[in-house]
Amino acid sequence: MDNLNAVTLSVNGLDYRGWTKVSISAGIERQSRDFKLDVTWRWPGQDTEIPVRQGDYCQVRIGDDLVLSGWIYSTPVSYDSKSVNRAIAGRSVTSDLVDCSAINKPG
């Protein structure tokens, strides 16, 4: 993949690549963007486990373009008899507004 389209996740001063699947969602009807990146466990040049935790601040870029600044929401691990899969999911900082917004119930 060329660097213009490479998706990079920056967390805790480190940049990560090596995704097996990428999903980044945004829409005019939504207040916050979200992402889910399926991760390879290791890739050439990487000698430690990815130290990403729920609640960590993150940035997602496509090439040099910043598309999302926000928080790690979850780091799910799933497995079956043939494989182990890890993902990193997050939401933009505007999710703070969504999560704390009041619901008006007139009456």
Image (cartoon, rainbow, N blue to C red):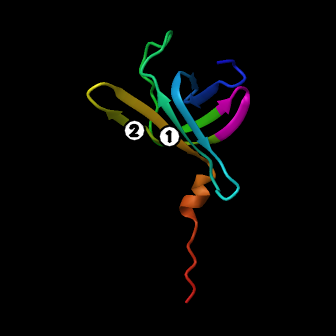
Q: Is residue 62 above or below residue 95?
A: above
Q: What residue is drawn where x is 43% and y is 37%?
A: 75
The amino acid on which the numbered mark 1 sits, given as a three-letter code, is Ala
On screen, residue 56 above or below 50: below
**Residue that protrudes farthest toward the left in the picture:** 81
| Residue under label 2 | 76
Left or right of 26? Residue 45 is: left
In the rendered structure, which segment of residues is drawn in magenta? 61-68
Residue 90 falls left or right of residue 41:
right
Mark earlier in primary sequence (1, 2): 2
The amino acid at mark 2 is: Pro
Residue 83 in which image quadrant: top left
Mark seen at residue 106: none
Q: Residue at x 55, y 30 (%)?
A: 12
Dot 1, crowdedness within 10 Å: few (<14), some or many (≥20)?
some
Do labels 1 and 2 touch, CB within 8 Å? Answer: yes
Quarter containing the C terminus: bottom right
In this orientation, which residue lies closer to the viewer: 15 or 31?
31
Residue underneath mark 1 = 89
Residue 93 x, y percent position in the rendering: 62, 48
What secondary structure is found at the residue carrying circle 2?
loop
User: Which quarter of the figure has residue 41?
Assistant: top left
Q: Is residue 45 left or right of residue 86?
A: right
Picture residue at 59% right of the left edge, 29% below the top: 10
Residue 1 in the image, given as x and y percentages of width and height: 64, 18
In the structure shown, which secondary structural element does the residue marked by tag 1 occupy? Answer: strand
Tell me the quarter of the picture where residue 96 sits: bottom right
Disc 1 from disc 2: Cα separation: 8 Å
